[in-house]
Amino acid sequence: MSNREFKSGPKRLRLAGRIARAFIESKLTPLVIVAALFLGAFSIFETPREEEPQIVVPMLDVFVRMPGAAPEEVAQRVSAPMEKLLREVSGVEYVYSINHPGMSLLIVRFYVGTKQEDAVVQTYNKLYSNLDRIPPGVSQPIIKSRSIDDVPIMALTLWGNNYEGYRLRRIAGELEYSLKQIDDVSETRIIGGQPRQIRVVLDTQRLAG
C-alpha cells in the first residue's frame, strides 16, 4: 500500500451507512429491540386462533332429470347448455357436470369469500329466468347448497368384470346401509350404477276396448 493510499483515510459513508452507524451507536437500540420482542409476544397471545377456521367457499348442486335419456344425450342437451348459463353467474369459479342415465348433476363452486345467500339467489335467478332454453321433457332444476364442511372425506368405488351396473348398485346400497350405522356419519350418497325401475307397458287394444 502506498503512502498516498494510507493517508487518504476511510471513504465517506453514504446515507444507509450513516443510518446503520447511528442505530448501532445509539443507547436506545437495546430498548427498541426489547420493546419489539414484547410486542411480538403480545401479538402471538392476543391474536385469535381456531383449530378449524371456517372458510366460506359456496358450492351448489344442481339436479336435473331427463327420464329415458342416455348419458350422452343428457350431456349434450342438458348439461352443456346449463354449464354455459351457470358460468355467466357472477362469482362462479368453475362448473362441472356428472351425467347419468336420465339425470344430470352440475356442481358449481364460487370464489372464496362469496356470500352463500348471494350465490344461491344469483344461481336461482339465472336458471329460472332461462327455463325457455331447457329442452322439452326435462324437469325443472333443483338447487341444493353445501359448504366446504360438507365435502366428503371418503369415496368408495365398486367395480367388477362380471358385475353389471344394476348389481353393483345393489351392493352399494347394502354398503351404504352399513355405513349409516357408524357414528358421526353425516351423509352418504350413491353415484352411478343402474337404479331399479319398473316399466309399465299398456295394451293399446285393451285400452281402446
Image (tube, rainbow, N blue to C red):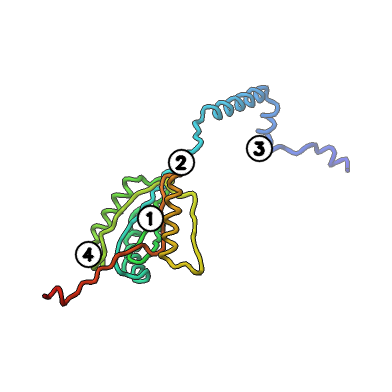
* Numbered badge on residue 16: 3
The secondary structure type at the circle numbered 2 is loop
Question: In this image, 59 relative to 124: left or right?
Answer: right
Which comes before the other along the chain, label 4 or label 2?
4
Q: Residue at x 49, y 34 (%)?
A: 50
- Residue name at image x 47 percent, y 38 percent: 53
Residues at marks 1 and 2, CA–CA distance in whole angstroms: 30 Å
| Inter-mark Cα distance, 1 to 3 | 54 Å
Residue to which mark 2 is pinned: 183
Depth check: 85 or 97 in front?
97
Judge the density around disc 1: few (<14), some (14-19), many (≥20) Cα neighbours within 10 Å.
Answer: many
Residue at 31% x, 53% y: name it: 143
Total numbered circles: 4
Classify 22 as above or below 131: above
Foreground tag (4 vs 3): 4
> Which mark is first along the chain, 3 or 1?
3
Mark 4 and mark 3 in contact? Answer it, CB < 8 Å.
no
Q: Nearer the viewer, mark 1 or mark 3?
A: 1
Q: Nearer the viewer, mark 4 or mark 2?
A: 2
Instruction: Indicate the amino acid at tag 4.
Output: Asp
Circle nearer the N terminus (1, 4): 1
Sequence order check: which comes first, mark 4 or mark 3?
3
Q: Which residue is mark 4?
A: 132
Which image quarter: residue 131?
A: bottom left
Disc 3 and disc 2: Cα gap in Å?
65 Å
How far apart in space, not on screen, are marks 4 and 3 (Cα)? 70 Å
Task: Name the residue that disc number 1 marks.
Answer: 108
